[in-house]
Amino acid sequence: MNRKIIFLDIDGTLTEPGSNVPPLTAQEAVKRARQAGNYVFLCTGRSYGMMSSLLSYGFDGVIASAGAYILFGEKVIYDHPLTEEQKRRAMEVLSENGIYRTIECRDGAYTDEGFKDFLRLHASEGGGSEMLRWREQIEKSMNILPLSEYQDQPVYKMVVMSPSVDALQKAQDALKEDFQICIQDSGERGYVNGEVINRKINKGTAVEFVCDYLQVPLKDSVGFGDSMNDKEMLETAGLSICMENGNDRLKDIVDDICPGVTEDGIWKAFQKYHLM
């Protein structure tokens, strides 16, 4: 069997949204897949600091910040933060349009004051895994600090919460040369949740980079995800799998759908495709 590279999103895929503890079956699946000679990478929108506690469960590498920061073992093999001009421009445009910003650095994140209250106000209205993730992260203080404490560290991406689709569209139009805005929630409940990502970088480009670095053909890569920021990863991987609890739009483009994160989905999919 050819060696595979398995790319696992975290929130809603490997773990319940906002959690740092994979189900025991997922932990065992990862362990056995590596014992079988396969590589297993985390591939997440989280910054490195917001997911580093997961490394104790044993992974070969990490794709963090939606592809902008990549490690193989303890070696940094890709490091591409926003330029100072990109950061300044994005911050200004988002603020001008009344959009709440959370900027993600390597080891922490910083959020607009008032963002907590906005999340609490709307969290009970439902939503996908990304809304739940941010609610849980803020409630548990997962290294997300007030923006006033930001010390000008490099920024890799931004998470945004807009009060309307129109406001976010205006920001997208102004920033489209350098950024794409991945919308996680369509605004049906009066807000829009999304990520502002460098247009040249995403989880798909990261999958290509890792496969090239490790000299494993793309056809031997496997991607697991659940939300729209996994789209490029799943379009790029040789085998794409969406969780049953995932976004319906994502399910239309993948090769297979496995049981949800709380239904031993990772274990069952690893078994089905002989990854362990």
Image (cartoon, rainbow, N blue to C red):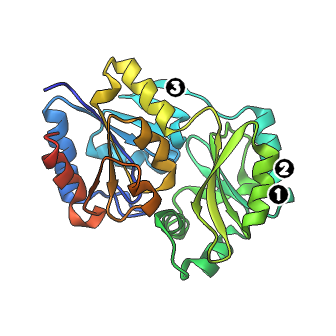
Left or right of 173 in this view: 240: left
Q: Quadrant of the C terminus?
A: top left
Residue type at mark 2? Glu
Tag of residue 92: 2
Distance CA(mark 2)–CA(mark 1): 5 Å
Q: Quadrant of residue 99?
A: bottom right
Residue 101 higher or lower than 44, as above or below: below
Residue type at mark 3? Tyr
Residue neighbourhood size for the residue with mark 1, other residues' Cα within 10 Å, grouped as few (<14), some (14–19), many (≥20) = few
Tag of residue 78: 3
The answer to the question of whether label 2 and label 1 lie on touching residues, with beta carbons closer than 8 A, is: yes
Tag of residue 95: 1
Q: Residue at x 47, y 25 (%)?
A: 76
The answer to the question of whether label 1 and label 3 lie on touching residues, with beta carbons closer than 8 A, is: no
Front residue of 27/231: it is 231
Residue type at mark 1? Ser
Left or right of 191 in this view: 140: left
